[in-house]
Image (cartoon, grey):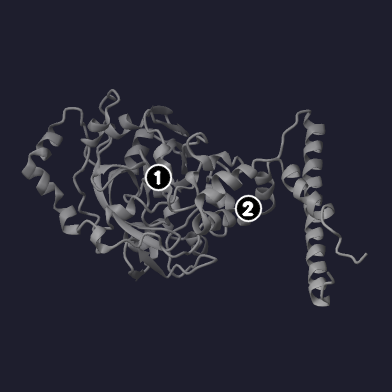
Amino acid sequence: MALRKKPGWALADSAATPESAFNDRRRLLKAMGIGSIVLAAPAVVRLSETAVTLPPPMAPETAAEQAAFYPAARNVRYRIARPLTAETHATTYNNFYEFGSHKRIWQAAQALPLSPWQVTIDGMVEKPLTMDAHDLIKRMPLKERLYRHRCVEAWAMTVPWSGFPLSALVALAQPLSSARYLWMDTFNDPSVASGQKATWYPWPYREGLTLAEATNELAFIATGIYGKPMPKQNGAPLRLAVPWKYGFKSVKSITRFHFSDKKPSTFWERLAPREYGFWANVNPAVPHPRWSQASEKLLGTSESVPTRIYNGYGEFVAGLYDGMDQKSLFM
Amino acid sequence: MKQRPMAASKRRLSLTLAHGVGVLFLLVAATALAFEVMAFAQTGSYRMVPSGELWFMIHVGSLNLIQAITQRYIHPALWDPVIAALLQWPAWSLLGAPGIVLAYGLPTGRRV
């Protein structure tokens, strides 16, 4: 459910970490001698962003060992022209419908247990897999990317995600040639997320992409943010980041990747198909039935800026939709 | 004490409206109960239909909207746990009880 409302994140500018300090953190770490310790950590085995040869899985690690993955080296291909959103805002102004419909979700989400966290890869694949999320993360080529994020509620943020390309996971899964869609499900545990006690909703939260979208270079599985492991309220331990689509497509706390030849019936599509459809590509010219999408409020500021088609990522993704019904792509 | 004609007229209108709402609640409660009984007759097992499920089936948009309004503009806890708990009750009891009160527990509003 989305409503246009007065933002609750209007904190003083003094609360924000200066961008220059954030961008310079690697130099600071290096000066402190921490960077070399992180790089030398023997448990950290990563691949380049394009490689898919996998090392054997390792034993579950401690939180401190997990933290050693971050900050990941930044991939400078994904540039942004906006200042980064302050971490305080990006980690306290969240939607996470399993925990409710309000904006104090970050506190409620702390109840989510992250270890163990089993991830299943199944459906139309060569060999179904189930593994611990941390083992999966260790097998993947972690990088940091700066992405804009555009919520369907007309606010936006710009954050440094850490994670790996979704295409690397697709390569790991080895989908059959008949697979056309990738479904992604979040957890389903009403004892943790009280919203899931409402059994009439179609839990678990499900989102999906076409396989062409999932293997587009922008599609990213985020495991960290601001150079640290992902906070629970932001979708730990694994969440999707597809910056050319409205934020509700970027499913959080994923437990299952399912390959299919059928388009998934997604959570919000089942609730309100005219408002939150399967494609949900950002387009300022196509308003939500109850509000305009022409501009977006930058989280943590009083600034509004014009929204761009595909959230400004058209050069990467517009070709995915050539020849398709343009009307349905933006809702 | 004798009421002035305008005040008495407003009171009668309010009572008539409340009575109408009560009758409506009772009708929906009866429908929900009939739904449960029919399901029981068909399957041989009883399954209570929570009020939230009935609301979801009838009009999911308003359920979603009212949750958002309650949690964002009034207080998150008013929805969860208070209203969320009520929505777990069977529809026939959640609507039937206030329906009886409104339909039969109030004065009729007619002059006697």
User: Whole-percent x and y of residue A108?
Assistant: 43, 43
Residue for badge 2: B60
Where residue B111 appears, x then y in whole percent? Answer: 91, 67
The residue nearer to you, when weighing A31 against A80, is A31
Q: Which residue is mark 1?
A: A107
Apparent side of residue A215 relative to residue B34 in the rendered image (left or right)? left
Instruction: Classify residue A329 as left or right of residue A74.
Output: right
**Amino acid on which the number 1 mark rests in the picture:** Gln
Q: Is residue A137 visible?
A: yes
Q: Nearer the viewer, residue B4 or A1?
A: B4
Picture coordinates of residue A65, whole percent (x, y): 23, 31
User: Which quadrant would residue A239 be assigned to in this image?
Assistant: top left
- Mark 1 residue crowding within 10 angstroms, few (<14) / some (14–19) / many (20+): few
Count of residue discs: 2
Please indicate, yes or no, whether residue A273 appears anywhere in the rendered image.
Answer: no
For residue A306, which quarter of the picture? bottom left
| A132 displayed left or right of A68 | right
| Mark 1 and mark 2: Cα distance apart in space | 27 Å
For the point 7% across and 39% down, which residue is it?
A33
Residue at (57% x, 43% y) in the render:
A202
* Label 2 environment density (alpha carbons within 10 Å; few <14, some 14–19, many ≥20): some
The residue lying toward the viewer, choosing from A193 and A40, is A193
Pinpoint the chain carrying mark 1.
A
Question: Viewed as shown, does residue A70 lie left or right of A207?
Answer: left
Q: Quadrant of residue B44?
A: top right
Give the amino acid type for the residue marked by disc 2 in the picture. Answer: Val
Q: Secondary structure at mark 2?
A: helix
Rendering coords of residue A133 (x, y %): 35, 32
Q: Residue at x 27, y 32 (%)?
A: A63
